[in-house]
Amino acid sequence: MSERITVTHRHGERVGVAAAGTELMSYVYAPDPVAYESRKPYAHPLRTLAGRRVSGYRPHDHRWHKGLQLAASHLSGQNFWGGHSYVPGNWYQDLPWLIGSMRHDCFEQFDVTPHSLGLGERLTWLANDGEPWADELRDLVVHSVEPDEGAWALDWSIELTNTRDVPLEFGSPAAAGRELAGYTGLCWRGPRDFGGGEVLAPDGRGGEEMMGGQSPWLAFVGEHDEIDAHSTLIFAHAPENERSIHESHWFVRSHGTPMVAFSWAFFEEFELAPGESFGYRYRVVIADGAWDRDRISRYLETHPFQEA
């Protein structure tokens, strides 16, 4: 049975979702103060129903990693990811004049029920010089806040439209030549104590062998410092993602920098023509405890995606 939620909106700054006295998520859309980190909305902190934090924020190794956020590491020569930029043949360089941003324009939808929150957000992707490059419609849905399951879910979907008169070229460091550095797209950064966590995928696969791999879902099981507890995050593709503009691969690291990204341009670039759009829909499930493959599969079977 779903738990009742409380939604708090600090206008111009953030939207918070709480249940049973625990803040489960804060969606921050106020512009960041640091342009070098690529200003964009993000969800942090993320917490389990038991109140355990499962997202990292501005870790010292990558200050631009902020909870769960949509980012594009290589986009037509600009960096909508943040931080240093990968330059083929010259490794990483600090090139602040290449860093773009994503501007929150408005919430077109703000639907709150006793058990769910639905946000429809309009954003503009801006090049470093302020030129609009793309319009985005982003939908966030918090749902299935279920103490009996020990979990809650966040659906995150996008529709991105090219507003330039030339194609937008989406890539990644791996597509530009750095092996296995295919990070781009919707990305989660875990807390530092999740380093060395367990990565699970269907059919017995798992671990960092899933770097660059494909599967309908991927899970990360982390162990917390200070308390005797584990938490599990499940990252799942909606079925229609297979028909989107470009096939996706996982970017996943366990040791050092616990991360999972739905990479939409891991091995090769793709183009979005002027005036054209593409969309993806994802689900992130945040659960207490160390879930195994059987429990993950049962949960996903009993909580299927609704028709888009």
Image (cartoon, grey):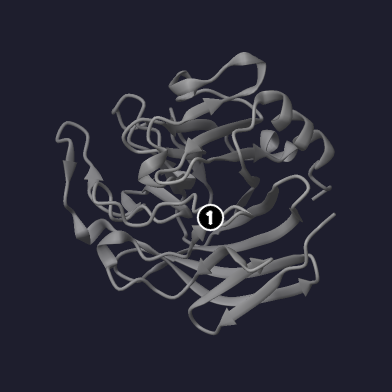
**Residue at 29% over, 27% down:** 177
**Residue 165, relative to residue 242: is it above or below?**
below
Residue 83 % position (x, y): 26, 53
**Residue at 49% over, 49% down:** 54
Residue 29 visible to the viewer = yes
Residue 222 % position (x, y): 49, 37
Q: Is residue 8 left or right of residue 272?
A: right
Residue 251 % position (x, y): 45, 33
**Residue at 19% over, 41% down:** 92
In terms of secondary structure, where does tag 1 sit?
loop
The quarter of the picture where residue 259 lies is top left
Specify few, some or many for label 1: CA neighbours under 10 Å numbering under 14, 14-19, or 20 or more: some
Q: Is residue 164 left or right of residue 23?
A: left
**Residue 107, relative to residue 141: is it above or below?**
below
Q: Is residue 182 left or right of residue 77?
A: right
**Residue at 80% over, 71% down:** 113
Residue at far bottom of view:
11
Per the image, the residue denoted by label 1 is: 274
Nearer to me, 15 or 78: 15
User: Disc 1 marks which amino acid?
Assistant: Pro
